Image (cartoon, rainbow, N blue to C red):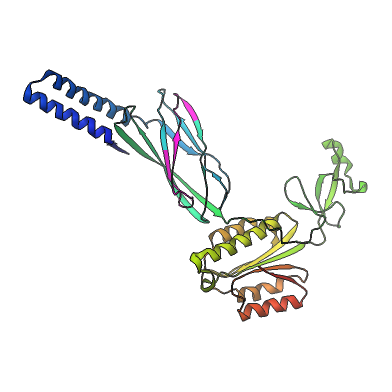
Amino acid sequence: MFLWPTTRGWVICLSGVAWIMVAMVNHALFALILGWACVALAAVSLLCAFFSLSGISVSRAPGGEAICGQLLNLPLRVVNTKWRRRQPIVVQEWLPFAAEARTSFVLAPMRGHSEILLERQVLPIKRGEYKLQGVILRGGDPAGLFCRRRKIRLPITIVVYPHLEEMPELHLPQDDSFLTSTGAPAAIAGNSQDFYGIREYLPSDGMRNIHWRSSARCRKLMVKEYERASMMSVVIFLDAYKEYVDRKGGRNLERLISRAASIFINCAELYCSVAFASGGNAPVIFKPKSANELRGELMYHLATMMAGDVKLGPMIDELSPFISPGATVFCLRLNHQDKEVNTAISAMSNMGIDVRMM
């Protein structure tokens, strides 16, 4: 906790001392009254500033997902536990990923025993994993002579995901899959022999697949749902070798990561499997898995990965045995002269795999 005079506070305090000294020298009653009035005002203001932040409780409220280029909501729940009214308070926090790292928000005056949800919106511009320590409250007295600062520890870890672009040029092969009410991928009812579960009837479902007991219980048509016999397969290769991507202040790497994240999010909205391989600061391989199951791990890797000395070629060789012939491969790289990568890409093309250089 810190408490110090403002510029106005210094003027009042020094004026009070000066007038008292003048009164002692000249025996002037007016100077004495004015001097003690300044001292009294400073003393009362000091007392008010000292208690201005006592009884204020701050906690974090649930916020949104942090994505570069999209507004992030970081709400705070502020509670006045005392009976007295509070004047406006300034809430500050250091956010290294935001467009303005040192953010300040003004909290409206609070009545006694009241609660306010402070909505704070910031614009993340740097991806990565960040550990925030807490917020700083700044208060004072009504006269503005003293400033009180109090630091509140509110540790939290925020992962800022890469910027997402629109990818209309992907043209992935669409199929007849749907999403269940829970968001899990599902097939058309009766599409295979492996039972998946019960879901709500869709216009494309056949009447013979209606589950009448569940329909009677739920008072709406429900159908038996089966696993798909096959699914669309997508593979993403990302070359983060530092010699190629460190140019232009690292913007090349950010562009590649943003494109990889955008492709993956588009795939996650479809019923498909995704495999991923990248070099950079560490070798990373994700074998084919449902996009929804892979989402957390892959997006975290894209948010935190850096350029490094690991090349893409060995990663492609290790993942190649798990790539199906009908897969769609997106290769994100800047150096098109890498012989090892070119050889692997040519081998996949000869197997009938759709390879797209982006």
Task: Please state the horizontal and vertical placement of residue 116, each as a whole percent of the image.
Answer: 50, 31
Q: Is residue 179 left or right of residue 113?
A: right
Q: Which residues are magenta?
A: 91-115
Q: Quadrant of residue 228?
A: bottom right
Picture residue at 52% right of the left edge, 53% below the top: 125
Task: Please state the horizontal and vertical placement of residue 123, each as a whole percent of the image.
Answer: 52, 48
Q: Quadrant of residue 25?
A: top left
- The quadrant of the rendering that contains the C terminus is bottom right
Relative height, residue 279 to residue 159 (above, below)? below
Front position in the image: 126 or 167: 167
Q: Is residue 5 visible?
A: no
Farthest-out residue, top: 29
Picture residue at 48% right of the left edge, 38% below the top: 59
Query: In the image, is residue 92 part of the stretch drawn in magenta?
Result: yes
Relative height, residue 45 to residue 326 (above, below)? above
Q: Is residue 306 visible?
A: yes
- The quadrant of the rendering that contains the N terminus is top left
Query: In the image, is residue 93 part of the stretch drawn in magenta?
Result: yes
Relative height, residue 131 to residue 248 (above, below)? above
Picture residue at 67% right of the left edge, 72% below the top: 319
Picture residue at 60% right of the left edge, 79% below the top: 338
Task: Please state the horizontal and vertical placement of residue 179, each as a whole percent of the image.
Answer: 76, 50
